[in-house]
Each structure stands twice: as C-alpha cells, then as structure tokens.
C-alpha cells in the first residue's frame, strides 16, 4: 500500500487538487478556510437546523433576484447586516410553511400543476399554433437558468403546496363593505380651502448681508461645514466573471462535452407510477402505525392477487386526494420530484412491477410502475451556445480558484505595494480619489461595506499597507492600499463662503416670510378683509391640488365642528402659509371607482395582518429559534 503511494505520489497530488480546486470555485477562498464555522446552526425550525451555509446560499439567491429586478440597486444595501438577516427571516418563513404543509399532508395534483403552468405568460409564448408546447424551446429556456423541466416543475409543485398553507386564511377572509366605508371614509372627505403662501424664495432678494453677518453665522454653525474624512486609494479586483471573455474553447472541447453529457442534457429518465396511500403521521404512536400498516398489507395482498385491479383499489382506498380519483396515477416524474423512500422504490422496479410496502413521512404506499420514458437527446446545434457558456464559466471559475490564493498571498506578503500581484496575475491597478466612509451609489467595489471597513483601518491609513484580500461575492476578490489620508476637518470660511452666504440668506428670507405670514394671520382672525386671498380650491387625501403635505395635514385635521377656521402653517425653509378652511363637502360620487380600489386595499391590509398572525402562530407551533442576534436598526449605509 505505502509503496504504491510513494510510486504514484504525483498522481495522487493531482487528484487531490482536482477535488480541492472546485471547492474554491464554488465557495470562495475565505469560505473554504472558514468551512467549519459555516456549518454552525443559525436557526431552528421544528427541531431541524438551518446552517450558515444554507443562509449564505439563500442570501445570494435573494440578492441575485433583487439585482435582476432593480439593476440600479445600491450594492451596499445587499451586503448590509440587516439585508442578510432579512434573508434568514425569509428562509425561516419558507421552512415553517414547508413544515406546516408536511404536517397537514397537503398535496398538489398534476392537474393543478398543469393549470399553473398554462397560466405562465412566458410558457404561453412557447406554444405552437395548435396549442401544443414547444418542448425543445421549453428545455432550452430552463437550461439557460440552470434547470431541467423536471426540476422546475418539482419546485413549482413545492411552491404550490406551501402556498396552500396561507390560502386557508387568505382564501376565507371577508371584509364587510360597511366596515371598509367607516374605516376609509375620512380618506374621501373633501374640504374647500383658501391658501395664501408667503414664500421664502420670493423674499430672498430682499435680504442684505454684511461681512460680519456671514462671519458670525459661520462661527456659530461651523459644524455644518465639515469636510469628511477622505482617502485616495489604489486597488485590484480579481473577478471570475471578467475572466470568462479570456477563455478560449475549441470546437472539439464543446463537442466532447456534449458527447459525454448528452443523456443528462436530455433531462434524465422519467418514470410513471400509480400508488395507493394510507396516511399516518411520522410521529404517530406505534400502535396506530401498526394498524395502518396491516390495512396497507391487506390491500397489497389484493393487488398481488390481481394487479389489474390496482386502479380500482386506489380509487376506493387511497387517501391521496391528488391522485386517488385518477386510480392513483402520478403521471411522469424524474428523480428529485418525490420523497426519497418513494423515489428509491420506484427506480428499483421494472415496468409493471408492484412494490412492497413503502413507508414515507406521509404514511404507507403501494406502488406500481406503469411506464418508463427516456427523453430524446437534444441536438448538438440546439445546445452548443449554452454548453459553450457553461464551459467558459467553469473554466473561469477554475482560473479564479487557481489565482485566488496567489492574489491573497501576494497582497499580504508584499504589503507595501499591489504591483507584484498586478504583475503576476496581469491585473490593472485602479485608483480612486476622495473616498469617504459613506460613498455614493456609483462607487463600485469601493462601495462595499467590508472593503470600506478595511480601507479605514488604522494599519491601512497609518502604515499605508495593503488590505487583505476581501471576498465581496462569489468569484470576486478585492485588495486596496491607501495612498493619502485626509482627516475630517472644518473647512475655512474662504472655502465655503458661497455656501454660508446662501444658507444665511435662505434662513433670513424664511424668517421674514414667517413674520409676515403670522402678522397677516392675526389680522384676518381679527376681522380684516380677506378679499385678497386666492380663490378657494377643493382638496381631499386623494385630490391634493399640488399643495404641500404640511398644508394638507393642517386643513384636513381641523375639527369639523370648528369650520370655518383659520390655521398658520410653518413650511420651514420654504416660508409660511395661511389656510382658511371654508366648509366640508361630501365625498365626490364620481370617485366610486377610486373608493372601490381603496376598499380593496383595506381588505389587502387586513389579509396581510391575518397572514402575519398565521406566520407568528406557525413559528410558535414549530418552535422557531433564531440563533444569531438581530442587527441593530438603522445599520444600513446611507
């Protein structure tokens, strides 16, 4: 044994590398190093752990969907502790619903699944003129998303099953129209008001300032004119995605992959079966299980005596609501679509065979394999583009994995420069000036919270040393070095004189507007003629007439018994407003459609509240435990 190892040590080393390198590509250097920590439990649902690895994967998927739906979304929001914790809460909710669906033995029939697929607008575009689905186009569409039809349909079936948990509440909710009218009536109440504005902008030219005024304001408000701490940096990015374009593949490589994987590209063998299910809970007492097992054995004996009666027996005795009416028929399915004991039994049968009793979490099954289908292999031409893209991505991940350790070592070992890493890996050193702890949304990799934290560490600032290699996503490493540091400081008056002048003039103009407005309000209250006020307008919560929210709030909150009434509204830097509420008006009947929409919104609010209450009840029922602390509020970067 040891002689073999000594003689073939190079071969063994290559084999080990082939096993190790994909791990770096899939999980990243930092994650592989911390693999032990990533297996820790971060939450529990129904006594089952959710690991940090599962949390990370769920967050990556959630972040990917958000980036696709909101391309301009600030990446820092997705990297924040609050965003990660929200992903964990979402994962916990999903697990709770899955646990509930299992306990309630919910199931989605093939007919329901087919109906849902027919409603899909994307799939509808793949239908031919005769209404049949273009199966090849269907496979290609899902293939571009890394799925086979079987995997997609299994996921959809699972989603529909879980959805049934909430439908028991949302599907039975009822909101009387009278209740909605009372609750939402104020939203449609109308008021006739007159508004006189005293605008600060109209008075700004009347403000005269002296040098002493400007100096005094600057001295009293120097905190308003702070220049934030800034650094100029240089940085390197090792990006697996950027390596894709550098990968060159020969036609022979693409063809070889197709030849070796043609069967799996076709989607794998499908099997069709029918079953008889007698349900019993996994945690049921032994005596109850024995009783159900004996009943199932009796049915199995009848089936073995005459297999042609299987469908008839299933219609009468099967407790699977989704398939019993069809004689237990489950149609075609692939591996991964059924629970493991059921799947293992089906794939061990020959066509026409009947299984022994199969116990799953749902109870006891009797299974008959009725058909086997091997999908046709897609043509090389139809798969060529997707195979090439997949192979390039795999090669890029491999190149990244091979370069990541070198990148990390060089920026650490030669800490006073990024040049060595740039030269070795043929990367471009990039620079950025005036980087702050809270950069704009267009800051790119320098907007990442972990990168910013490393840049503003004392070693990076004082010793001008490279940061460590920081993983900012799957297949992306960043290292940076501070070139120059500028601490936060109060800007001199000469630098900000224009800003000081503008701010002071605005404040003085707003003060003048408030003084004039308050004086005029008192005069009108005392009985002075208000003929100069603008013509009245009719406002409501849904018809604002373009008025500022402060004015609307004052006008619509005036007690009905005090109308007509006067009110003064401080608009801050914009000035002041005097509002006269002349009279109340009934809701506009022309807004019947709007009222109906609001009633529907009110119903939706109630549904959301009921759904939330259901979630909290299920979390208590399935003993949810969050094992990591919730981040403090307001931790999202501004």
Image (cartoon, rainbow, N blue to C red):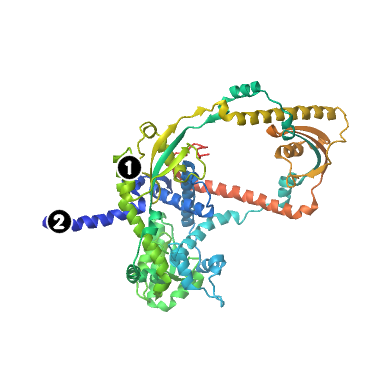
- Secondary element at tag 2: helix
Residue to which mark 1 is pinned: 411
Residue 50 in view: yes
**In this rendering, is residue 596 above or below 446?**
below
Up the image or down, 243 lies above or below 190; here it is: below
Residue 628 appears in the picture as rendered:
no
- The residue that disc 2 covers is 5
Relative to residue 401, is residue 60 drawn left or right? right
Q: On the picture, is 191 further left or further right than 471?
A: right
Which quarter of the figure has residue 538? top right
Q: Position of residue 464 (x, y in %)?
A: 36, 34
The answer to which of 104 and 281 lies nearer the viewer is: 104
Q: Is residue 448 left or right of residue 18?
A: right
Residue 536 versus residue 614: which sits nearer the camera?
A: 536
Identify which residue, 406 or 501, lies in the foreground: 501
User: Dividing the picture into quarters, in which one does residue 140 lie?
Assistant: bottom left
Spatial separation of the CA atoms under disc 2 and disc 1:
36 Å
Residue 42 percent across, percent down from the top left: 41, 44
Would you say the residues marked 2 and 1 are in contact, meaning their CB atoms lie under 8 Å apart? no
311 shown above or below 616 = below
Q: Secondary structure at mark 1?
A: helix
Specify the label residue 252 is tagged with: none
Q: Position of residue 360 (x, y in %)?
A: 39, 61
Q: Earlier in the sequence, mark 2 or mark 1?
A: 2
- The picture places residue 611, in percent across and down from the top left corner, at 57, 50
Please, is residue 356 above or below residue 548 in the view?
below
Of 196 and 177, the residue lying toward us: 196
Q: Residue at x 52, y 44 (%)?
A: 441
- Quadrant the N terminus occupies: bottom left
Circle 2 crowding by C-alpha within 10 Å: few under 14, some 14–19, many from 20? few
């Amino acid at each position: 044994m040891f002689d073999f190892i000594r003689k073939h040590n190079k071969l063994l080393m290559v084999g080990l590398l082939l096993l190790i390198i994909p791990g770096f590509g899939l999980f990243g250097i930092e994650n592989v190093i911390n693999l032990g920590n990533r297996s820790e439990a971060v939450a529990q649902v129904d006594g089952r752990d959710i690991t940090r690895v599962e949390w990370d994967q769920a967050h990556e998927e959630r972040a990917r969907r958000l980036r696709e739906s909101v391309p301009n979304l600030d990446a820092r929001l997705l990297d924040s502790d609050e965003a990660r914790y929200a992903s964990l809460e979402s994962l916990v909710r999903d697990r709770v619903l899955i646990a509930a669906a299992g306990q309630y033995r919910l199931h989605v029939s093939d007919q329901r699944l087919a109906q849902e697929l027919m409603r899909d607008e994307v799939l509808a575009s793949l239908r031919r003129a005769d209404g049949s689905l273009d199966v090849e186009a269907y496979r290609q569409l899902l293939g571009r998303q890394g799925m086979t039809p079987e995997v997609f349909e299994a996921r959809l079936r699972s989603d529909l099953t879980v959805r049934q948990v909430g439908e028991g509440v949302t599907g039975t909710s009822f909101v009387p129209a009278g209740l909605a009218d009372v609750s939402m009536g104020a939203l449609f109440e109308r008021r006739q008001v007159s508004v006189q504005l005293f605008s600060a902008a109209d008075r700004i030219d009347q403000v005269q300032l002296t040098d002493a005024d400007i100096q005094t304001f600057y001295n009293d408000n120097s905190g308003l004119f702070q220049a934030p701490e800034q650094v100029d940096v240089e940085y390197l990015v090792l990006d697996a995605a950027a390596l894709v374009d550098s990968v060159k593949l020969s036609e022979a490589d693409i063809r070889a992959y197709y030849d070796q994987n043609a069967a799996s590209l076709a989607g794998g063998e499908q099997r069709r079966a029918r079953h008889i299910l007698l349900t019993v809970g996994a945690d049921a007492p032994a005596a109850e299980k024995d009783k159900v097992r004996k009943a199932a054995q009796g049915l199995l004996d009848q089936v073995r005596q005459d297999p042609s009666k299987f469908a008839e027996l299933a219609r009468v005795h099967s407790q699977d609501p989704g398939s019993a009416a069809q004689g237990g028929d489950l149609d075609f399915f692939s591996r991964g679509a059924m629970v493991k004991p059921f799947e293992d039994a089906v794939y061990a049968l020959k066509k026409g065979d009947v299984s022994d009793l199969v116990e799953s979490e749902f109870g006891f099954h009797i299974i008959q394999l009725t058909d086997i289908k091997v999908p046709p292999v897609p043509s090389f031409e139809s798969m060529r583009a997707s195979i090439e893209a997949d192979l390039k991505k795999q090669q890029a991940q491999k190149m990244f994995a091979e370069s990541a350790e070198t990148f990390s070592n060089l920026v650490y070992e030669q800490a006073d420069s990024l040049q060595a890493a740039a030269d070795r890996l043929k990367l471009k050193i990039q620079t950025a000036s005036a980087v702050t702890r809270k950069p704009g949304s267009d800051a790119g990799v320098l907007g990442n919270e972990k990168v910013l934290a490393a840049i503003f560490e004392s070693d990076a600032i004082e010793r001008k040393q490279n940061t460590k290699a920081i993983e900012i996503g799957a297949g992306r490493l960043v290292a940076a070095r501070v070139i120059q540091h500028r601490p936060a400081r109060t800007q001199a008056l000469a630098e900000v004189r224009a800003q000081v002048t503008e701010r002071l003039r605005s404040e003085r103009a707003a003060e003048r507007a408030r003084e004039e407005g308050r004086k005029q309000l008192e005069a009108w209250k005392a009985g002075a003629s208000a003929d100069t006020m603008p013509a009245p307008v009719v406002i409501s919560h849904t018809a604002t007439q373009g008025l500022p929210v402060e004015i609307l709030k004052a006008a619509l909150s005036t007690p009905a018994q005090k109308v007509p009434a006067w009110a003064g509204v401080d608009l801050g830097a914009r000035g002041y407003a005097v509002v006269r509420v002349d009279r109340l008006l009934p809701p506009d009947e022309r807004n019947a459609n709007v009222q109906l929409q609001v009633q529907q919104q009110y119903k939706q609010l109630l549904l959301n509240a009921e759904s939330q209450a259901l979630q909290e009840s299920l979390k208590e029922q399935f003993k949810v435990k969050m094992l990591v602390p919730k981040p403090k509020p307001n931790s999202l970067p501004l």
